[in-house]
Image (cartoon, grey):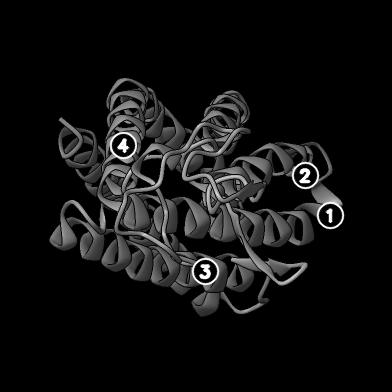
Amino acid sequence: MAERNGGIVMKCTSCGCDMGNSKVCVSCGYEYPENITESANHIPESMGTSPEDGKQIVEDTSTVRRAEKYSFLRKRLPLLFWLIMPQTIGFVLSNLRWLNMLPQITDSVMAKYVASIAFWGNIIMIATSLAYGLILLIFSKVEANYRKSGMLNLIRVLSFTGFFAPSLALIIWIVELIIAVFAMYYEYQAHSDLVFGVDKALSESWDRLWKWTIRICAALACAICLTFAPSVISLLIAGLVLVVGLIGVIITGIVRIVLLYRTSRSFR
């Protein structure tokens, strides 16, 4: 209410217009009950939906978005499934070139066959990494870490030029390995975050796979650095560690496929 010229003038709590002595607002038509004389905090039911209705709308919208997200992941994750195995095979074959550093192979006829196999493995790696990176960029609409992994996979493609520059092969390979490690980290983290609210055990499996992956990458890095050592014993150790590391890459690739299959199934 407001006081004017000694009288009391009512204001409409719905639109704020002066009502004079009337109980019906001439502006919005709101009618006050007989027992209401002053209600500064009164909100008519016609003003909008109740808090419960608003909460329900938010929940319904969230449910729709979650269903769309699950449908997208269920259809697109198998694309990664089919790329992992050729990518893993390409990685293993391309790294066989380091065996040519061993004295038992360098001076044998096997050297040219190893170099040829490594070359085609490198081509496979370029093609699969390019496709893998583009698909991860598409996945960035549901998880931000996919974008980081996708960009790193695309950058990783450029590092394969080291195959054609033998004098810089070790430096470029180390740079490529670092890029690959970060690309896998962001990808595994994205998978883990996606399924955390759906299957916590599966989320933890992705975290464990990352820990094993970083150990295998460290072993490969040590092995390849040892191939440049002058000692014959160091070269033999490097060859043994390299073979074991590449077997580890194959095993983690298989585990990665299994986890991706379980991840896609978790969104059904």
Question: Taking 197 as reference, is 253 above or below it?
Answer: above
- Circles 2 and 1: CB distance less than 8 Å? yes
Q: Nearer the viewer, mark 2 or mark 3?
A: 2
Which residue is label 1 attached to?
168
Hey, what amino acid is under mark 2? Gly
Q: Nearer the viewer, mark 4 or mark 3?
A: 4
Hey, what amino acid is under mark 3? Ala
Q: Residue at x 50, y 78 (%)?
A: 233
Looking at the figure, which quarter contains the N terminus? Answer: bottom right
Alpha-carbon span between mark 2 and mark 4: 44 Å
Which label is found at residue 113? none
104 and 114: which one is in front? Answer: 114
Q: Earlier in the sequence, mark 1 or mark 3?
A: 1
Which residue is label 2 attached to?
162
Give left or right: position of 102 versus 209.
right
At which x and y percent is residue 74?
27, 26
